[in-house]
Image (cartoon, grey):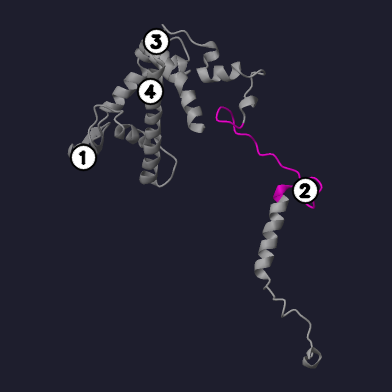
Amino acid sequence: MSQNLHRALLRPAVIQILRATGFTNARQSVIDTVTDLASRYLLLLAASTAENAVNNHGDNIPTVQDVRMAMAQAGGLRPQMTAAQEDARGWEKVQDEWVPFEDLRGIEAFLKWAQGPGNGEIRRIGGLISSEKDSADVVLTEDNEDYLTAMRKKHSKTGEDSKFQGSVLGRDSEEQTVVIVGGAVSSIAEWGQQVRNLAVSSAVTPATSGISSAPDTPMEDAE
């Protein structure tokens, strides 16, 4: 269910990218295939970035370097030397400081592609163009909004995100206190605390058997 939703959200972006690239029409199966390839690639980048974060600094919070390594591993940066080839180049002087050689051709080519005029329409759809000087031949959307924000407003009668609150399309919903009516406790939190206290007291108090707690009975009476 979640995978289908994410693919459905990615599909309009893929269609807009194809349109910006120059495609005017495509078969349904072609769009589905390209969308599936894009989702697999994004999932590969995300998984590789998370793995790099754990290996590089022992946590799940990625840095720009982790993302760059994931892009290089997935073949997104070309041309790009391997780590061994960079080490073989030794050190270089950058701004009067000696640093290990680092191949930046892939990064520079990626930035040139992402910020170039050929992708002006893609950046417009993503809401990344803020002024006319960024792209003179591209018409901005109303209020410089991306397609997903515009879609949410279109399907919300009030124009707010309250309809999508608590879903993947909106903000996280705030936790509400659930009140238990008619019981000895006023909320689930209080009930949970009572259960924990009862468990602790049961663990501390030694259990007694029915035989040990029975009243003493003289042997002769028992006969």
Crowding at dot 4, Cα within 10 Å, few <14 / some 14-19 / many 20+, comes out as: few
Residue on which the image places disc 2: 186
Label 3 close to label 1 by CB (< 8 Å): no
Report the front residue among 199 and 140.
Answer: 199
User: Which range of residues does the magenta coloring cover?
Assistant: 166-189
Whether 32 is drawn above or below 222: the answer is: above
Report whether 98 appears left or right of 111: left
> Could you tell me which quadrant the C terminus lies in?
bottom right
Residue on which the image places disc 4: 33
Residue on which the image places disc 1: 84
Count of marks placed on residues: 4
- Tell me the SS state at disc 4: helix
Which mark is nearer the camera, 1 or 4? 4
Label 3 close to label 4 by CB (< 8 Å): no
Which mark is nearer the camera, 3 or 1? 3
Whether 199 is drawn above or below 179: the answer is: below
* First-in-chain label (3 vs 1): 3
Q: CA distance from mark 1 to mark 4?
A: 36 Å
* First-in-chain label (2 vs 3): 3
Q: Which mark is residue 42?
A: none
Amino acid at pointer 4? Thr
The image position of residue 206, as x and y in percent, is: 67, 73
Label 2 close to label 3 by CB (< 8 Å): no
Amino acid at pointer 2? Ser
Q: CA distance from mark 3 to mark 1?
A: 45 Å
The image position of residue 108, as x and y in percent, is: 30, 24
* First-in-chain label (3 vs 4): 3
* First-in-chain label (1 vs 4): 4
